[in-house]
Amino acid sequence: MKLERESIELLLKALEKLEDGFDLPEVRHDFDHKKMEEVIIAAAERMQNNYPYFHPLFAGQMLKPPHPIAKAAYMMAMWINPNNHAMDGSKASSPMEKEVVSDLAKMFGWSQHLGHLTGGGTMANLEALWVAGNIHPDKTIVASDQAHYTHERISEVLKLKFSKVATDESGRIEISALEEKLKGGNVGTVVCTMGTTGLGSVDPLKEVLELQEKYSFRIHADAAYGGYFRLLDNLEPETIEKYAHLDSVDSIVIDPHKQGLQPYGCGCILFKNPEVAQCYIHDSPYTYFTSDDLHLGEISLECSRAGASAVGLWATHQLMPPIKNGTFAKDLAKSRNAALKFFNKLYYSDHFFPLLKPETDIVVWGIEGKKTSEMSDQATAFFKKAEKNKLYLSLYKYPTSKIKNSKFAIDSEYLTCLRSSLMKPEHDNWLEEIWTRMLASI
């Protein structure tokens, strides 16, 4: 079945159980069901104009299908449509959100924390930098030149000073360049990217922590894409060590809608020190009365938030807890295996070459050639031909200044490469089919 539909049966059973919980007079709605059917079929026809994001042959951008349990639970919750801003509008889903946020905090080794779900990584990172700015209002936010572009944009929105630090040829923050910044004495927060969205590279967190002892600054870990890799044992030893130190940072962002099998949008912000709640203190004349417990809206910049996101993530955690050696971790390990197998195929190929060994499940590679300008043109042409062969990839511009010991002439500022996010567990079994279509696209 091209599109998984068994979750519809789960949804119908769940809706029956949900309805049993309300002993209320029936409300009749006068809907035009024939017109609704026409509209929904028209919408389905419009949605056909999409790439097949759900299929393993979509091996390009960072798009991972939600798990059937997440889809069914999310849709079931939409019949209630809770708002997880306050307990008044989310009596059941707010406690579920607190449970899943606690699960994620424990995954990083935190028994105490402050945090909540967000609409995505951008909002989660905004809250992290907003708190950082409250603690160090006149100091600079520092991130690598491979960090997500939103950090610079968020800093501009918050009127915070921002500075980029160079990265090495693998896309990781250069410790020597970072220390030069720190010597100036005006750095308040360093952003460590625990899995860049371009190359999948992980910043050297241990070394940054050593600099923190010397220069005293906050560390924010942007693990929106890569946070779940902390559960894996099939990473490189040095990468495992980087993730092992995440319990020592000040704040973490992780996006369950990236690797956590959730629908958009589901991000999460976590703070190690619960006392940062002081930054959020505000009053509302009508909102926080249903419970004396802390309402999620009292520790969030967002107001209305979809409680369905919490329900979908809660159901997923019940089925597949985010723990080492569990079903979730084993499925994620398949994506990592796929990336390593793909790397080996590229390495021994006569037509392609891997840019670097993948650190997570993102693989970037180039087309063999004599000079970078021609190789870039060939990569763009290959990308288009692969799409005609129903293999969906993405492109990535790599600075040629970082290329060392090349066998080709460098005559352009960037080398356009191909990029694959092998995020689906099924990619592990589909590599031969992917490779066949690649060879047919040369």
Image (tube, grey):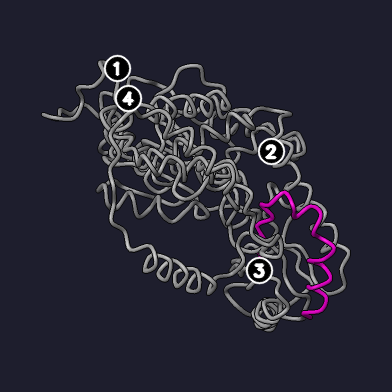
Which mark is in front, 1 or 2? 1
Residue 190 visible to an observer of this rendering: yes
User: Counting residues from the N terminus, which is met first, the one under dot 2 or under dot 3?
Assistant: 2
Horizontal and vertical percent for residue 438?
A: 78, 73
Residue placed under numbered mark 4 in the picture:
276
Q: Is residue 66 above or below residue 21?
A: below
The answer to whether mark 4 and mark 1 are in CB contact below 8 A is: no
Magenta-highlighted residues: 419-442
Residue placed under numbered mark 3 in the picture:
393
In the rendered image, which quarter contains the C terminus? bottom right
- The one of 244 and 405 positioned closer to us in this rendering: 244
Residue placed under numbered mark 1 in the picture:
293
Q: Is residue 118 above or below residue 275?
A: below
Residue 368 magenta-drawn? no
Numbered disc 1: secondary structure: loop
The amino acid marked with disc number 3 is: Leu
Which mark is in front, 3 or 1? 1
Numbered disc 3: secondary structure: loop
Give the label on residue 239, or none: 2
Q: In this rendering, would 352 be left or right of 163?
A: right
Horizontal and vertical percent for residue 184?
A: 38, 40
